[in-house]
Image: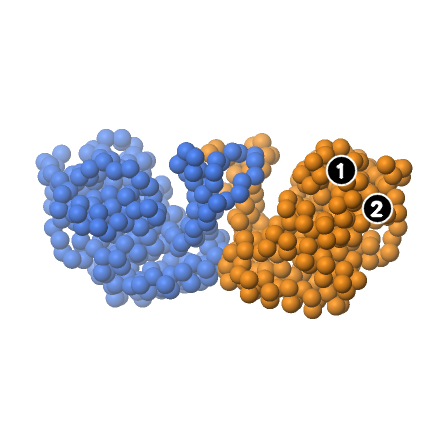
Chain colours: A orange, B blue
Amino acid sequence: MILTVTLNTAVDITYRVRSLRPHTSHRITEVTERPGGKGLNVARVLAALGHRVTVTGFAGGATGRSLREQLTGSPGLVDALVPVSGPTRRTIAVVDTTTGDTTQLNEPGPQTTPAEWAAFQETYEHLLRSASAVALCGSLPPGVPVGAYAGLIRAARATAVPVLLDTSGEPLRRGVAARPDIVKPNADELAELTGSHEPLQATRDARRRGAHAVVASLGDQGLLAHTPEGLWRATPPRRVHGNPTGAGDSVVAGLLSGLVEHLPWPERLARAAALATATVLAPVAGEFDREAYEELLGRVPVMVGQPV
Amino acid sequence: MILTVTLNTAVDITYRVRSLRPHTSHRITEVTERPGGKGLNVARVLAALGHRVTVTGFAGGATGRSLREQLTGSPGLVDALVPVSGPTRRTIAVVDTTTGDTTQLNEPGPQTTPAEWAAFQETYEHLLRSASAVALCGSLPPGVPVGAYAGLIRAARATAVPVLLDTSGEPLRRGVAARPDIVKPNADELAELTGSHEPLQATRDARRRGAHAVVASLGDQGLLAHTPEGLWRATPPRRVHGNPTGAGDSVVAGLLSGLVEHLPWPERLARAAALATATVLAPVAGEFDREAYEELLGRVPVMVGQPV
């Protein structure tokens, strides 16, 4: 199975309001709610691609219970979340139906104790034994040490399980130094890590810092992959309009599924780019349009470059 | 016991953010959560005044379960909420810590079926038998008939239980016609009901429409009571700054506790006005500052008027 880790799981709530005006009162016309946090999104896409997936991380409080109940209804996912005493965070996306713009409100996540962190590590090391690959995704809840991902990467490497890291800031910086197989920063995360806004130079620098392969997700400009096997760029076959939420998580699912299926890099990248585009096209944030995915898959241009 | 009815209970969530800017992403610095809906707020104040209180209305879903768990910790309150299949709504107050302003996002509440509404009415009629007074508070969830409060008022009157109504719009209009003992509109609700922005005339008109007594809560201008026993105005003893959320609910608690204690109207109004001011002064929305309340209680000017 593929293991995805979401230390800061979330209940993702979307509110539709007619027009968001600060300091006034709003009647919400539509509420949707789903289990969230990057690793859970990745897991859902992997399951939809036919992979067996186990999800771990923390869940707690009434929100955590609600999240786990909703996970029960997700086919192909095994829930191996670890209980935490604090409540799982909510994220609120307020969609202004007049402008189409979204305002995001993110709770910080549960305060996590050293004992809870130790319990998680034990569960993680147990799960690694039957994992074909692992994805470490998203932010850390308060109380989890900033070097958490570095430790989890070392544990995966010690058991020879390929590990992908998708996070930002200091947890990314420390994680990269622990030599993960793949990191998948977006343009901002890559620039923050390396100090360079030039993707070719920045992905090379991220490899120098420890990552074996770097796949940068650059929005409309597609994916730039700097790997031991070569340099590639996968471009979206067409410009699409829609909701980009979850597109990065679909890239992770594409890369990870391609890895465990032993696909060559160009095919992994084509799959990841097609999934990301199909995610932007889906009406519900974080899901992908399967028909669009299958149609796009054969039409992603992947160009090979000279390593610089 | 005193019975309070909250058909559209809520989990009231308060978020503090540094500065709310539409179409950007915000990290919430502080989250607080408490059981809400006007009738639950009224019940908490009544319990703090030493009364035995039973709360009923609807609760459902993960939010309803969380609300009921939090109620368990409220001393003096008996939970007689009726299960509903849809989820209890959330209300989100986003406090901008830079300006102090609040932006409100209110979910609509659970879709309620005729069978659920019938189950509620049965519970209500059972509870009425041991009630000394009943307060009907707040909005109606989707699916509950707009004449709901009128029916509940007639049931209370049939069992000779004094009934107070605190709602707005069409449910208020229909409820007033069913001849409740007291209605407590604010200035906007009163103007919407009667078409008059002149409180003396509007309270008189609201009595003509069926209410035995009308107590209008007019913010800084205090309370105006038009009753069969006379006309009074209770003025806040001093201007205060703070959070007015829940001040109207404290007025209801003051009026209802005064009613069951058989206090004369001027004392009921003094208590209600002192509680409202002490609620504005409390740091947590919907709670009251007990020390301030006791100090203010003897200093509320209540003037008697000539009925017009």
Chain letter for mark 1 = A
Left or right: A220 with respect to B38?
A: right
Q: What's under tag 1, amino acid-wise?
A: Ala
Expressed as whole percent of the image width and height from the top left, the position of residue B75 reads: 31, 63
Chain letter for mark 2 = A
Q: Neighbour class for label 2 at 10 Å: few (<14), some, many (≥20)? A: many
Q: Secondary structure at mark 2?
A: strand
Q: At 43% from the left edge and 40% from the top edge, which residue is drawn? A: B95
Viewer-proximal residue, B199 or A255?
A255
Q: Earlier in the sequence, mark 2 or mark 1?
A: 1
Q: CA distance from mark 2 to mark 1?
A: 13 Å
Expressed as whole percent of the image width and height from the top left, the position of residue B283 reads: 33, 46
The part of the image, by quadrant, that contains residue B72 is bottom left
Q: Which residue is under mark 2?
A: A227
Q: At 33% from the left edge and 65% from the top edge, which residue is drawn? A: B78
Left or right: B278 with respect to A38?
A: left
On the rendered image, what quadrant is the N terminus of chain B found in?
A: bottom left
Q: At 77% from the left edge and 40% from the top edge, which residue is drawn? A: A205
Expressed as whole percent of the image width and height from the top left, the position of residue A241 reads: 70, 35
Q: What's under tag 2, amino acid-wise?
A: Thr
Whether marks 2 and 1 lie on the same chain: yes
Q: Neighbour class for label 1 at 10 Å: few (<14), some, many (≥20)? A: many
Q: Is residue A208 visible?
A: yes
Q: Secondary structure at mark 1?
A: helix
- Looking at the rendered structure, the number of numbered marks drawn on it comes to 2
- Proximity of marks 2 and 1: CB atoms separated by less than 8 Å: no
Q: Which residue is under mark 1?
A: A202
The part of the image, by quadrant, that contains residue B94 is top left
Is residue A86 depicted above or below A169 in this figure? below
Q: At 67% from the left edge and 61% from the top edge, which residue is drawn? A: A55
